[in-house]
Amino acid sequence: MGYDNVSGSQSGRAAGFVETLECRQLFSSAYSVTDLGPVVSPGGNVVTNLNSAYANPMGLNNSGQVVAKQPGPKLNSPVLFANGQVTPLASLSRWMRNAEPHAINDSGVIVGGFLGARTETEWAGGYGFFGATYPITVRLTDAFVYDGRRFRDIGPGYATGINSSGEVVGVGDHGGAFLYANGHRRALLPPHIRPRDIAGVAINDAGDVVVSGYDNGYRAYLYAHGSRTAVPLGPTPFDAVAINDAGQVAGTAADPLSASAAMLVTPTGTASLGPGDFMLSSMNASGEVVGREYVPGTNYNYLFVAVASQNGTLVDLNTLVPPSETGWTLRYAQAVNDVGQIAVIATNGVDVPHYLLLTPT
């Protein structure tokens, strides 16, 4: 769940806010396209299956720095793309050889998950009527913070977001959300939500944290900066994905007819961001949202195109960056920053997924 970077009914003010998105830089008609390399699988191989590619997170900050996974000899080989250079993070810290980065802040601090020293026993086999089971030992994931000099293990699970102050949020390996700040970690567990039912957590630069969990439908809760009390957000059910510095929360809601829709929840109300087949992934400070939209495929393939939400209407980013000119079909917009850059997963003529960075020109 990609994650990195307030209640009420529809209002004229909220709708007016969404209408102003059409003049934002995100919807520029011209982008420069930077190929950051092929997508890698958890086994370290180049991914050729699109559905597997979508599971690879990308982190993007306001300086255009991107963290992602690249092909390598280890389970994960994370890399940093910055200023036209590619830096294998394993060359800077041996702990990064089995790490999966999720987010990077404007100071270049990276967070995510890595295979730590903890292990547990799982049972495999059991296939067929007389299938026998046998124990296997697996390494568990710990959350990490890496600032380019020091690698810190901050406990079980994986980190999903970090703000400009270095406050980190994430999800435990057996559920439950957490906040890591000033060297201390504390659990964030909204009422009525079991730890294993936590779906995601995000943080903004003000230190506000939004947590989503499942309780007869997804529900979102807000922890204001420093507060230990969770305040319910938005419509019910509502699965929050991102929160920005204006306190706007983007997520997916269900209407009375059980159809889902992407929603923007503001302090004054809610506004639609697109239909239910729009899977949003990131939001910037201006409330601009990117993600992917399902399109019919062949042979039971789940195909998507990268999209952004404009005035409640989805914009296919391929209409702004035509495949006929670039050679790339944009499949999934993973992250957007405050200057309008977008990190995407795209395919070329042979459908090999690559990471791209779109920069408005």
Image: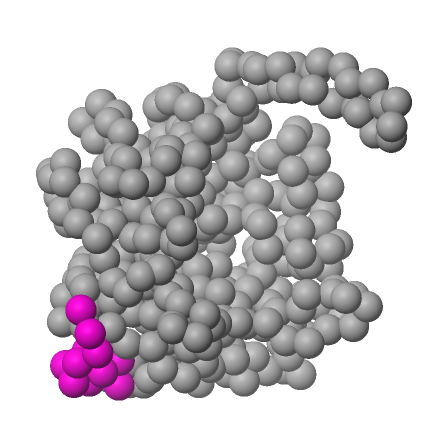
Judging depth in this view, the residue of 354 and 131 nearest the camera is 131
| Range of magenta residues | 8-19
Left or right, 357 with reference to 339: right
Q: Residue at x 58, y 50 (%)?
A: 55
Q: Relative to 157, is 256 above or below?
A: below
Q: Nearer the viewer, residue 215 or 44?
A: 215
Tell me the residue at 33%/84% (across/down). 311
| 11 part of magenta stretch | yes
Q: Is residue 204 left or right of residue 108?
A: left
Q: Main secondary structure of the magenta part?
A: helix
- Rendered view: 134 above or below 332: above
Q: Residue at x 85, y 23 (%)?
A: 131
Residue 96 lies, with reference to residue 162, above or below; the image says above
Residue 223 coordinates in the image, percent (x, y): 18, 45
| Quarter where residue 321 is shown | bottom right
Considering the image in quadrants, where does the C terminus appear?
Answer: bottom left
Answer whether residue 262 is visible to the viewer in this image: no
Q: Position of residue 214 (x, y in %)?
A: 40, 47
Question: Which one is nearer the viewer's eye here, 331 or 175?
Answer: 175
Q: Is residue 210 visible?
A: yes
Instruction: Kindly indicate the quadrant of the structure image that contains residue 310.
Output: bottom left
Coordinates of residue 57 in the picture (x, y in percent): 51, 49
Residue at 76% x, 15% y: name it: 134
Instruction: Quadrant for residue 189, please give it.
Output: top left
Residue 152 drawn at (x, y percent): 36, 22
Colour setting: one colour
